[in-house]
Image: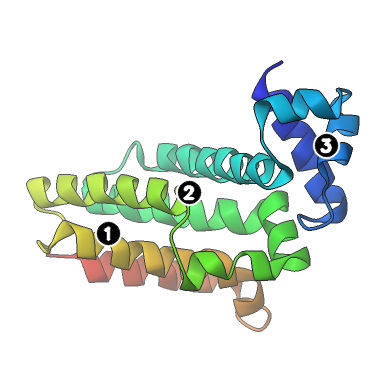
Amino acid sequence: MADDVLLDAARSCVLAVGVRRTTLAEIARTARVSRMTVYRRFPDVRSVLAALMTREFSGLLRTASERGADAAHSRERLVLIASAGVRALSADPLFRTLLDVDPELVLPYIVERLGATQKFAEQALHQLLEAGHRDGSIRRAPVAAQSRSVLLVVQSFAFSLRPATADVDEAALLAEFTHVLDAGLKP
């Protein structure tokens, strides 16, 4: 049995009841397999959910990276990808459910450690920044600090876009986001 079948079942469960209320037994029932089948692939429900989040959010970021394919230079590509990533994450039903139903589960990824998806995004940013240094479209700075800084800006918009647009037009806010990124990276 492929992990995707189990992860798809876990996704359905999370969308129905949230992360905290999703059980291994419910994942098995939804996938129409035994609990033992799930245990053979994942040691516990937490590892299933971690794999699900990594698959889903990394996939969204991969799709967003296609947005910059026609960019004139690396800075424009990075800004287009970051904007598409913020839009995709903030609109994603799984991400929305996580923030709406179990927001306390996000807190460690903001104040304690970076998760796999954040590291994936940071690596992509690192490569884009290096390309921008080479083509002259991005101001030179230590890439590790620069990529971490951009990651923090992008993630703050992704996590906060919905409440931030309660009284501010979303299109205007996202336009300002792209301006902030572009201006901050100009040589």
In primary-sequence order, the first of circles 3 and 1 is: 3
Q: Quadrant of the C terminus?
A: bottom left
Residue 79: percent from the left, percent from the top? 35, 56
Q: Secondary structure at mark 2?
A: helix
Query: Residue 4's mark?
Result: none
Dot 1 amino acid type: Ser
Dot 3 amino acid type: Ile
Residues at badges 2 and 1 in contact (C-beta under 8 Å)? no
Query: Can you identify the residue that label 1 sits on?
Result: 147
Q: Secondary structure at mark 3?
A: helix
| Res 56 → quadrant | top right
* Outermost residue toward the top in this view: 1
Dot 2 amino acid type: Thr
In primary-sequence order, the first of circles 2 and 1 is: 2
Q: Secondary structure at mark 1?
A: helix
Name the residue: 65% across, 77% down.
Answer: 163
Query: Residue 27's mark?
Result: 3
Name the residue: 70% across, 33% down.
Answer: 7
**Where 100 falls versus 84 (above or below)?**
below
| Residue 138 visible in the snapshot | no
Residue 138: percent from the left, percent from the top? 16, 58
Residue 84: percent from the left, percent from the top? 48, 51
Q: Is residue 153 left or right of residue 52?
A: left
